[in-house]
Amino acid sequence: MPTRASVKRYVRRQVLRAVYRADLRRPLDPDLAVYGAYWNRGVACNPAAIHAKARELVPHVRGLWVVSSRHRDRMPPGVPYVIEGSRPYWRAMATATYLVNNSSFPGGFTKRPGQRYLQTHHGTPLKTMGLDQRAYPALARTTDFDKILAHVGQWDASLSSNPHSTEVWDHVYPGGYERLDLGYPRNDVYFTATAEEIARVRAGLGIAEGQTALLYAPTHRDYRDGFVPDLDPRRLAGELGPEYVVLVRAHYFYGRSAGPAATGSARVLDVTGHPRIEELCLAADALITDYSSLTFDYACLDRPIVVHAPDWAAYRAVRGTYFDLLSGRPGDTPGPVTTTPAALADVFRTGEWRSPEAAALRTAFRARFCPYDDGRAAERVVRHFFAAPA
């Protein structure tokens, strides 16, 4: 028998739906843009950079963010927002002319004629995406491909940071949207940040002057529960000595803390809860990662990247990838590759991480995956998307 609470929730949803249908008959607001990122986790990624640049270049367009109730504490002071599923949320979705998201808007909204939806995405695809996931049973069982296609049908434009991404988006998200090969706005800061700004970020994180900061940022595994790193950051910091500090960034799917993996050492800092991944990249002298799309963004900085990938075979089997990140071929591999903690420590002890060979790999990788990023992507996107006829 339904509980009183469940009945109340059902009635509320029905009322909101009825009011939303009425709002769909209201005129569109030509000066309203609704933004969302990472399934309503707050101000972040490409939408955040676009919002900031839109306030500068098209100040008459009001920006409104969608955030879930459990993440409302992430909202910066003074940034307007609505809670997903609320009455103000449905009114905004019914009347906004511009919609910008790096994932999807909640609740199954009805896209109206005259509304313009920009899908920014949130990374360069190494792992299989969209319709390509049908070939992997563990993914296919939990993925609604009809829902994916319906979502793609709402897009008016799809943003890309490199030709590889454009090619992948075309076949995994087939649709009639416009292809915008304009670069990733979230990467602009890698070209515009000053030495003083970087020093301020490092000091704020607690990185001592003269220390070498290593950002360890592994990606999510579909076949693991919780954050289970493939190395012990405390052991790595201990082996490398006091001139190194390890910043640990767990994937956002795992919450706001790296847990026990990042405790117990003064030279291991848990930065999972830091609001801006871009600042962490600016603060780091090198990146240690595996299959994360952060690899492609960090390459914009032209700083060393070390791939630590002991479970590459399992990852490829379960998730599938578009190229062999560990092949060592220029353009595929961004730097030294390790598969054991001992080998990883040796990469830094011997200086291999910043060797001429590592630099050559990084240069080829940048050429392939960062050709559109130059510090002005947000400006290009805003001038194109908001100037286009609605």
Image (cartoon, rainbow, N blue to C red):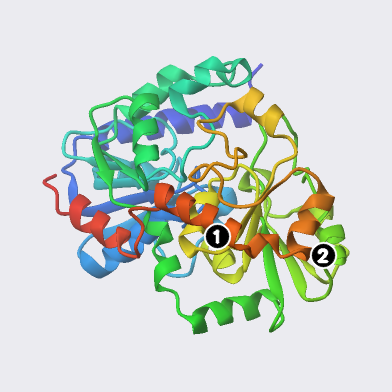
Residue that carries the numbered disc 1 in the rendered image? 359
**Callout 1 touching callout 2 (CB < 8 Å):** no
CA–CA distance in space, label 1 to label 2: 24 Å
Vertical placement of residue 87 versus 79, above or below: above
Location of residue 376 in the rendering, given as x and y in whole percent from the top left corner: 30, 63
Q: Position of residue 255 (x, y in %)?
A: 68, 49
| Residue occupying image coordinates x 28% and y 46% | 181
Among the two numbered marks 1 and 2 on one chain, the one whose residue lies closer to the N terminus? 2
Q: How many numbered circles are shown?
A: 2
**Would you name the residue on which mark 2 appears?**
237
User: Three-letter amino acid code at disc 1?
Assistant: Ala
- Dot 2: element: helix
The reply to whether residue 151 is visible in this rendering is yes
Assign the C terminus to one quadrant of the image: top left
Q: Amino acid at mark 2?
A: Ala
Pinpoint residue 273: horizontal percent, then vertical percent. Answer: 65, 59
In this rendering, the answer to whether 334 lies above or below 264 is above
Look at the numbered disc 1 and give the secondary structure of its residue. Answer: helix
Q: Is residue 362 left or right of residue 351?
A: left
- Residue 156 badge: none
Q: Residue at x 41, y 39 (%)?
A: 105
Q: How dense is the environment of label 2, judged by Cα within 10 Å: few (below 14), some, or many (20 and up)?
A: many
